[in-house]
Image (cartoon, rainbow, N blue to C red):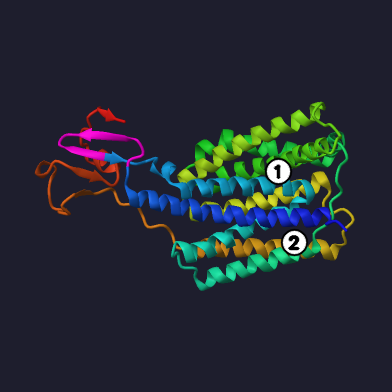
Amino acid sequence: MGASDNTRGLILAMVSSLFIGASFILKKKGLRRAAAAGTPAGKQLVVPRAIIGVGGYTYLLEPLWWIGMITMIVGEAANFVAYIYAPAVLVTPLGALSIIVSAILAHFMLKERLRQMGILGCVSCIVGSVVIVIHAPQEHMPTSVQEIWTLATQPAFLIYVAATVSIVLALILHFEPLYGQTNVLVYLGICSLMGALTVVSIKAIGIAIKLTLEGINQIGYPQTWFFFSVGVICVIAQLNYLNKALDTFNAVIVSPIYYVMFTTLTIIASAIMFKDWSGQNVSSILSEICGFITVLSGTVILHTTREEEPATSPGTISWYDGDQAKGLEDAHFTRLHNSDYFDQRNFPLETDVRT
């Protein structure tokens, strides 16, 4: 007897979380190795009487970083396929498991201490995920992209899309210029709203691909390409404003708020379009909501109790003989640990670049 679609989606979502969680640690460990090596990735800037190695891209030569990148790609691919088989109400909250994997591996591999409240956050995520899995609805698999189009053009979902687009435009045109640099909800609101549309578009594309591989060609339908175009636009906008949020605000603040908003809006959008909760009794729906809130609480606890990265110093100069007291005129060779050191002190850099 074969496994149900929900079981396939559950397994893929858990595998995705495992790979994505591990990828963060592998890439971070690779970055640390590259920083410790201190070897220039390809260029050196020459200043008077000093040769300064600038290794901004040294991590590209580190195999461990590439292993982490490949692991992340595999995880994202598994997550993409999971949405084909299981409803978003099951797949999306399980993304919190990647945070657990990352926190545990960081404790052992990066020596980042996992505090007692962090352990409580992990337990909360696991308990909430189990509750969601037990009460997750069985999804009806559409038999064509035209059926998905019918779901996408139902009045309830059209109202949701119209409200989403209106709010996004208001945030971009009015609130971003005024409050974008001071209120994290502006950028994250845009990311989360667009992210929810990204998920439903990707789900539609994934189902179309699955049906095509099974011999029911969906490539020729214009609806398929419409969902593809919407998915691309939403992904670009989502990544753009997420990067703005990360550039402007502390990651410790951005990550939990974004996860809560994105997951909530994704579940709402999917429930409206694909009717994930149709046919379920009130008890099951309330149990899923409670499990979801438990996962969100655990995620926030994990993020708020994790140790922050030490602040980066403005930059120092160390001579090869180890003497920190020398000035620039006292020796010929120096290593720059942070190129901002010279920018902040208005040292003129020569334009000669050696590759």
Q: Main secondary structure of the magenta part?
A: strand
Where residue 145 appears, as percent x and y from the top left, is 83, 35
Tell whether label 2 touches label 1 (CB within 8 Å): no
Label 1 crowd (10 A; few <14 / some 14-19 / many >=20): many
Q: Amino acid at mark 1?
A: Val
Residue 127 image-quadrant placement: bottom right
Q: Amino acid at mark 2?
A: Ile
- Of residues 310 and 301, which is closer to you in this image? 310
Number of numbered discs:
2
Q: Which residue is mark 2?
A: 289
Say which mark, if any, is on residue 322. none
Where residue 253 appears, as percent x and y from the top left, is 51, 54
Label 2 crowd (10 A; few <14 / some 14-19 / many >=20): some
Q: Quadrant of the N terminus?
A: bottom right
In the rendered structure, the answer to whether residue 275 lies left or right of residue 12 reads right
Q: Quadrant of the C terminus?
A: top left
Residue 126 image-quadrant placement: bottom right
Q: Which residue: 82% across, 53% down?
A: 5
In the rendered structure, the answer to whether residue 204 lies left or right of residue 338 reads right
- Of residues 114 and 155, which is closer to you in this image? 114
Q: CA distance from mark 1 to mark 2?
A: 19 Å
User: Magenta part of the protein: which range?
Assistant: 40-52
Foreground disc of the pair 1, 2: 1
Q: Which residue: 46% across, 53% down?
A: 28
- Of residues 136 and 262, which is closer to you in this image? 136
Q: Which residue is mark 1?
A: 199
- Of residues 175 and 193, which is closer to you in this image? 193
In the rendered structure, the answer to whether residue 75 lies left or right of residue 355 reads right
In the rendered structure, the answer to whether residue 200 lies left or right of residue 71 reads right
Question: Residue 148 magenta-drawn?
Answer: no
